[in-house]
Amino acid sequence: MASYPNLKIFIVDDDLFCLNLYQQFLLNLGYINITAFTAGDDCLQQIKEQPALVFMDYNMEGMNGIELLKKIKGFDSHIMVYIISGQEIGLVAKESLQYGALDYVLKSSLSPEKMNAIMKRVEQYYTPHRSKEGKRSFFEKVKSGLGM
């Protein structure tokens, strides 16, 4: 079960079947704060909500996954991103990692078990990152309170 059930997760895929399937995988694992989008532009309009994690399809109309990844990382480099695609691992996977995705996942390999493994990895990354952010904001508040 989810250690962080309220972890804010965005899913972006123009294929409604896949979108609903991934959302169901996450709900079954205990995650409840999931927002689904069918277009990259819609996701970007809500990115100010600062999700901890974004799952996105690579091949979408209007904006592909790499373009969306670059824009998300430009907004906040700490947002974790997984690219999901039907294309075999190759240039797309290399680009995904180059621009800051945590990993690249083939649609055909994504199962409830694979999603569980992904989320365990995400939570391992999220825990120390979350505590660093908490410490940083605490010290920033202290500094501002002292007039520094």
Image: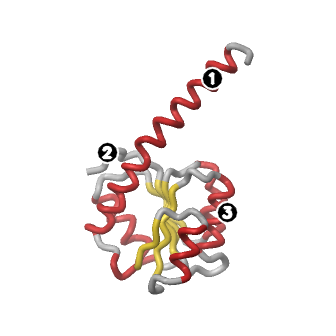
Distance from disc 3 to disc 2, alpha carbons, whole Å, reads 28 Å
- Which residue appears at 51% of the width and 76% of the height? 93
Q: Between residues 38 and 125, which one lies in front from this camera angle?
A: 125
Residue at the spot of label 1: 141
Comes first in the chain, label 3 or label 2? 2
Residue at the spot of label 3: 71
Comes first in the chain, label 2 or label 1? 2
**Which amino acid type is marked by label 2?**
Ser
Q: Between residues 36 and 115, which one lies in front from this camera angle?
A: 115
Q: Where 101 sits versus 7, above or below?
A: below
Distance from disc 1 to disc 3, alpha carbons, whole Å, reads 29 Å
Write down the quadrant of residue 23 in the picture.
Answer: bottom left
Q: Where 134 sits versus 29, above or below?
A: above
Comes first in the chain, label 1 or label 3? 3
Residue that sits furthest to the top in the current view: 146
Distance from disc 2 to disc 1, alpha carbons, whole Å, reads 27 Å
**Which amino acid type is marked by label 1?**
Lys
**Which amino acid type is marked by label 3?**
Lys
| Tag shown at residue 3 | 2
Cβ–Cβ under 8 Å for marks 3 and 2 = no
Q: Is label 3 in a helix, a strand or a loop?
A: helix
